[in-house]
Amino acid sequence: MRIALFVHCYYPEHYFGTESYTRLIARNLRDLGHEPTVVTATFAGEPSQDDLIERYRIDEIPVLRIDKNLLPHAGLGETYLQPGMAEVQTRILREIAPDVVHVTHLINHTASLLGVCERLAIPSFATFTDFFGFCFNNKLEAADSSLCAGPDRLRANCIACLMRDSPAPTPMRRWLQGARARPLVSKALARRPGLAGADAAEIIDLQRRPDRLLDAYRTYRAALAPSRFLRDAYDANGFENLVLSHFGIDLDRSAKPAAADGPIRLGYIGQLAPHKGVHHLLDAIRRVDGRDALSLAIFGSEAQDPAYAAELRRLADGLPVTFRGTFPVENVARIMAELDLLVIPSTWYENSPLILLQALATHTPVVISDVAGMTEFLRTGENGFAFRRGQAEDLAAVLRRFVDDRDLARRMSGSTDYERTSRDMTRDLLSMYEQHGVQVRPS
């Protein structure tokens, strides 16, 4: 069976998140006798390609990459529905001639892809890896940094996010985007977009976004959701035919080596960005009496958000913290073997992050924010603890437990595991196809 996998980016150096999921699925489909092809894109603003469509292979799997520098979004509306993409998408699908299209992210492709699939009568499926389908910022984080349930009736809360994140070149616009004025102004603009003047079209496109995507997503025969929370969030916002399928992890599951005497080794692995909450972790360590009994290794690229990374280095001054950069995905198990605890202090709704599952699979206990999408994997006191999102003092209280009981992390390691593999989630994917009318047969 020929399967076209659409993902927003797919570069050899990427190893977290949706790209990693897509790579695992592609490898398993290949090993099961199917013919996967990955379709991806170069983001507008990244170095240009020599051609509109570049072809290469990763893991002996064909990859077609579209250069979005040549097809950039013209306005907010085209970030979710870009008719100008349809011609190149049609050309690619006719070249691949897939039996199925499976989308792991629509950023760069937009919902125009689903219209092309419908016109070409190609069954389409998806794996939802974040909240792109109904949330403007993909994170379900409101403009005041609280957690959000989705767009309100007038989309005023979405407009508030737009106002917070948009450039504000004049003193008047900066005032309108201020935290105090933002709730009132966003509600006024939701009712009368024309008040925004030249920005009215952008606001109208934003208000249309949830309904346009809901209509487009109804062309999916079904979709996988890797957490109960994400499944329920999409269901609450009008989406149907969602199948729960937890991510699978492939790595060395050997018992954790005995730690040498010394500090309790904490680790953070992931993006260095404000919504990941690393600043709260540093604040928490500073609040712990006897913090010399702790050490923290931070793994992540400082180039993604240099200003935030510089702030983290300032906050880490004088603390037992090292910045270790990034590492190849095949080294995950080795890195986890060097840690006693993995800390994930995110302030947004994480959706079954792979690094959490990798920690559990390598018998590494976790300390996580109490946000849905992570807590469903927690057995409190057995494989980890949760703390109140964004509350450094609450996180510090959890870390004190390990300082006061130096053997706690080792004992918890013995009851920390995660057995599900990528082959398991690939079987879920193929089963979903069969249950929705696609005859699954190896090539």
Image (cartoon, helix red, strand yellow):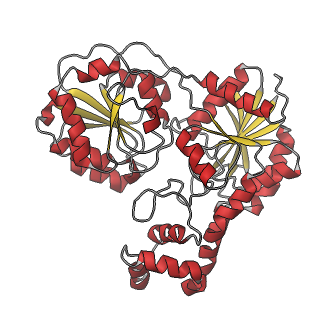
Q: Which corner quadrant of the image does residue 223 belong to?
A: top right
Question: Residue 71 sits in which quadrant?
Answer: bottom right
Decide: is 123 above or below 142: above
**Seen in the image, is 399 located left or right of residue 134?**
left
Q: Could you say where residue 306 lies in the image, as x and y percent from the top left?
A: 37, 53
In the rendered structure, the answer to whether residue 125 lies left or right of residue 385 reads right
Residue at image location 61% in from the left, 57% down from the top: 134
Residue furthest to the left in view is 290
Which is nearer the eye, 377 or 54? 377
Q: Is residue 5 above or below residue 75?
A: above
- The picture places residue 156, in percent across and down from the top left corner, at 53, 72
- Quadrant into which the N terminus falls: top right
Residue nearest the viewer, comparing 228 with 322: 228
Q: Vertical placement of 345 versus 403: above or below? A: below
Q: Is residue 304 left or right of residue 296?
A: right
Tell me, yes or no, if residue 81 can be seen here. Answer: no
Q: Count the numbered circles shown.
A: 0
Residue appearing at x 75%, y 57% in the figure? 85
The residue lying at 28 percent from left, 48 percent from top is 280
Position in image of residue 205 (x %, y %): 65, 71
Q: State whether residue 409 appears in this view.
A: yes
Q: Position of residue 215 (x, y in %)?
A: 74, 58
Q: Quadrant of the C terminus?
A: top right
Q: In this view, does 409 lie above or below 237?
A: above
